[in-house]
């Protein structure tokens, strides 16, 4: 029996990816007594792996370690009967002291260990007669494609309940056999994107602003290789004072990463500002300055909320895409880039989404970088 030993923390993705890659038959999860940072994530991981049939529940064991006393950690580790090639260790997780002590313990026991870097890379440490050897492993891009993003969200965020799992979108039979370029051309010219989608758990018919852009964006994402996209997911976020509902327009997993898409099918605030001035014909500069300020605050608030929700849901492994009808102004672009929010314009949607998923810099972002560094 191959047993993977890992250290729980609030960030679940290193644990999920390591189980998906190594496919252990048993899992030992080390955790501290800190409920929010370690114990609760450990319990959620156990439930996640069992519910997704990645491991048998009886083969997942939790072990408590101290988190602030090196000697106490060392003594606890030495109580465990982990010997030989049947054990290997993931040191990605826990706090720095726990990770350091577990890596030293692994080295003493000559247990192979590893940690995960960004971009789906594993650094593996193995022992031989010649000493410690390292090996770099690049995980396949589709390693987590079959994981439900809804399950991942429930596992990642302790304060979130899924109020509504939303619709699951895939290409229908007609779309699978049709020319994909022709489909997007038809939809860009007014065809209903839903005509080409298989929609599981459809929401009640109630057309609202932005629906078409969400379906069109999902259609293009499917064309670009996403296996399935979840639409209109409602999360109930609870804290001590109150609970609030957040709706995620689109969410999917791609290249071992959770992606969240926010669609804004509205004209820019600049258009609203200029339109109000023309319609109302009020000659009060102070009032117009105030209106312009409020509109700008609204956009900044939207960007900030996108960032906060995504950061809480997926931590460092979340990609955020904001699909907009019109481009952001320079200040908003700078804020978006600082928060790691990618921008995709409706008029150039397919190319922008392709650039984002392939890790390329779009013209929009390149323009912002040029202005930021005063280069042309």
Image (cartoon, grey):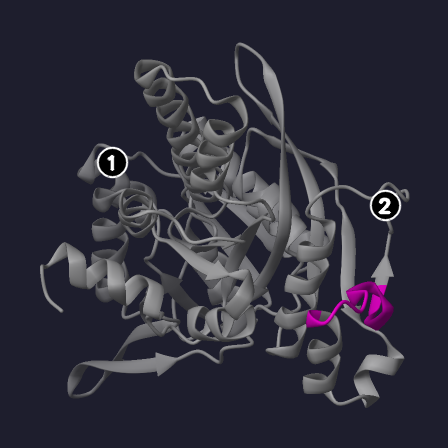
Q: Position of residue 223 (x, y in %)?
A: 65, 78
Q: Is residue 52 visible?
A: no
Q: Which mark is residue 255?
A: none
- Up the image or down, 48 lies above or below 17; here it is above
Q: CA distance from mark 1 to mark 2?
A: 53 Å
Residue 278: x percent and y percent?
A: 49, 31
Say few, some or many: other residues with alpha carbon within 10 Å of mark 1 (under 14 / 14 to 19 / 20 or more): few
* Residue at the spot 59% in from the left edge and 78% down from the top edge: 224
Tag on residue 203? 2
Q: Quadrant of the C terminus?
A: bottom left
Vertical side of 255 occupied by 281: above or below: above
Q: What span is colored magenta in the figure? A: 188-198
Most extreme residue toward the top is: 241
Along the horizontal axis of the image, is 131 left or right of 252?
Answer: left
- Which of discs 1 and 2 lies nearer the camera? The answer is 2
Picture coordinates of residue 164, whole percent (x, y): 76, 38
Q: Element type at marker 2?
A: loop
Return the residue at label 1. Answer: 72
Q: Is residue 22 left or right of residue 331?
A: right
Q: Secondary structure at mark 1?
A: helix
Between residues 193 and 6, which one lies in front from this camera angle?
193
Residue 93 in view: yes
Q: Please tell me how crowded label 2 is: few (under 14), some (14-19), or many (20+) other residues with Cα within 10 Å.
A: few
Discs 1, 2 touching: Cβ within 8 Å = no
In this view, the residue in front, 30 or 316, is 316
90 left or right of 184? Answer: left
Give the quadrant of the N terminus. bottom right
**Quarter of the figure with residue 118:** bottom left
* Sequence-first disc among 1 and 2: 1
């Amino acid at each position: 029996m191959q047993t993977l030993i890992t250290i729980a923390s609030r960030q679940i993705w290193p644990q999920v990816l390591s189980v998906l890659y190594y496919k252990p038959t048993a899992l030992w999860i080390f955790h501290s007594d800190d409920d929010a940072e370690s114990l609760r994530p450990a319990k959620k991981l156990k439930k996640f792996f069992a519910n997704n049939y990645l491991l048998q529940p009886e083969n997942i064991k939790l072990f408590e370690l101290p988190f602030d006393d090196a000697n106490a950690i060392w003594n606890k580790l030495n109580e465990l009967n982990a010997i030989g090639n049947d054990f290997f260790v993931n040191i990605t997780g826990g706090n720095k002291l726990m990770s350091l002590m577990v890596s030293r313990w692994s080295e003493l026991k000559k247990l192979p260990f590893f940690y995960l870097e960004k971009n789906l890379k594993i650094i593996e440490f193995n022992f031989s007669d010649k000493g410690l050897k390292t090996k770099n492993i690049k995980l396949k891009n589709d390693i987590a494609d079959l994981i439900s993003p809804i399950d991942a969200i429930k596992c990642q965020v302790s304060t979130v309940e899924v109020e509504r799992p939303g619709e699951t979108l895939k290409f229908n039979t007609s779309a699978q056999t049709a020319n994909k370029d022709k489909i997007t051309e038809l939809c860009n010219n007014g065809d209903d994107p839903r005509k080409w989608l298989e929609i599981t758990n459809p929401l009640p018919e109630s057309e609202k602003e932005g629906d078409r852009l969400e379906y069109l964006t999902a259609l293009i994402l499917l064309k670009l290789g996403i296996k399935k996209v979840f639409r209109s997911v409602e999360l109930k976020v609870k804290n001590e004072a109150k609970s609030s509902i957040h709706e995620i327009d689109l969410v999917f997993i791609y290249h071992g990463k959770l992606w969240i898409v926010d669609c804004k099918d509205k004209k820019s605030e600049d258009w609203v500002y200029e339109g109000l001035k023309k319609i109302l014909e009020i000659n009060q500069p102070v009032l117009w300055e105030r209106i312009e300020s409020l509109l700008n605050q609204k956009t900044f608030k939207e960007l900030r909320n996108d960032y906060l929700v995504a950061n809480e849901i997926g931590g460092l492994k979340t990609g955020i895409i904001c699909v907009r009808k019109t481009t952001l102004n320079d200040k908003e672009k700078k804020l978006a880039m600082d928060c790691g929010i990618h921008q995709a314009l409706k008029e150039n949607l397919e190319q922008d989404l392709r650039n984002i998923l392939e890790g390329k810099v779009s013209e929009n972002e390149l323009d912002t970088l040029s202005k930021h560094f005063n280069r042309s």
